[in-house]
Amino acid sequence: MTKTRDHGGGLDAAMARWGGQRKDWVDLSTGINPHPYPIGQIPSHSWTALPDEAAFKSLETAARRFWNIPPQADILAAPGASALIAQMPSALSGQSVYIPPPTYNEHKAAFDEAGWNASDDADALVVVHPNNPDGHLWEASSLSAKQIIIDESFCDVAPDQSLIDLSRREGVIVLKSFGKFWGLAGLRLGFAIGDPDIIAKLRAKLGPWQISGPALEIGATALENFDWAEQTRAALSNSANRLDALMQNAGTTACGGTSLFRLYEVDDAAIWQNRLAEHHIWTRIFPYSKTWLRLGLPPSDRWAQLENAL
């Protein structure tokens, strides 16, 4: 059985301890856009028919255009980036991996489960770009390994920083998540982009019809909406600045993040989390730091609850 790993979310446990119903809480423990892409009407055939090749092609074409994917790179849609992360060790060759900490822990968990060893001089390198939780951005020139996984789950807020051009290289895979920037985490849609040989192995692991009809429909439509993406980036940036001002006035120090989540230095992160939870504000702390507190962005109608809590 897979061990329980440290993540954001877990609002059920918070409600059990501090009371209230889900509607009373503001969940800032994740980096999910609080104003999701409006999905609109979903054609009935998306629910009732097996996804056809044309639907997959439509989604992949939209993804190539949106992310400016090099023609040499293959692309595979999957039921969430997490599903791809879990399969990556079996699609690569070697026995050792380097994953610079601290970062999103599912990568290490996947390689640990597959029996890989941690090593600085490794067969594979995994980086999260921008990094979760500190927002660190990697330089392409600093990434040297025979096989490289670049997790860009949070990079859609800063497309000019994307390392997608590296996906043309042999041994490179770039991962994309649809749950963060578009705010549709429940849709379970992610992408692996890069080396065709590695993509072929991942495709065989996932099998046919790996994406639901509604996910294909919503994903293709959203990826074609460049205006929504530009407006959303501006709105997220403004909200992140507002959050920084609030938290700094409350005595914290901003120390990184992205415009989907912000990281703060506090005197005691656990105490901060507990005190905010008393006001039904749920935040993110980390087992490897006693002073890091991470907050996502509240929806526009819940800022007052956070301000009052602070």
Image: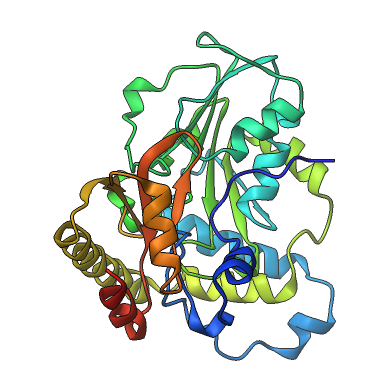
Residue 283 shown left or right of residue 240 in the figure: right
Q: Which of 128 and 263 is in front in this view?
A: 263
**Is residue 73 positioned above or below 308 on the image?**
above
| Quadrant showing the C terminus | bottom left
Mark yes or no: residue 197 visible: no
Seen at 53% across and 38% down, the residue is 72
**Is residue 48 positioned above or below 110 on the image?**
below
**Residue 54 percent coordinates (x, y):** 70, 69
**Residue 158 percent coordinates (x, y):** 31, 53
**Residue 199 percent coordinates (x, y):** 68, 39
Residue 288 shown left or right of residue 214 in the figure: left
**Is residue 307 positioned above or below 249 on the image?**
below
Seen at 65% across and 49% down, the residue is 82
Mark yes or no: residue 56 visible: yes
Q: Which of 227 and 259 is in front in this view?
A: 259
Q: In which quarter of the image is residue 280?
A: bottom left
**Residue 89 percent coordinates (x, y):** 70, 29
Residue 130 shown left or right of residue 153 in the figure: left
Seen at 42% across and 73% down, the residue is 34
Q: Which colour scheme is used?
A: rainbow
Seen at 57% across and 76% down, the residue is 19
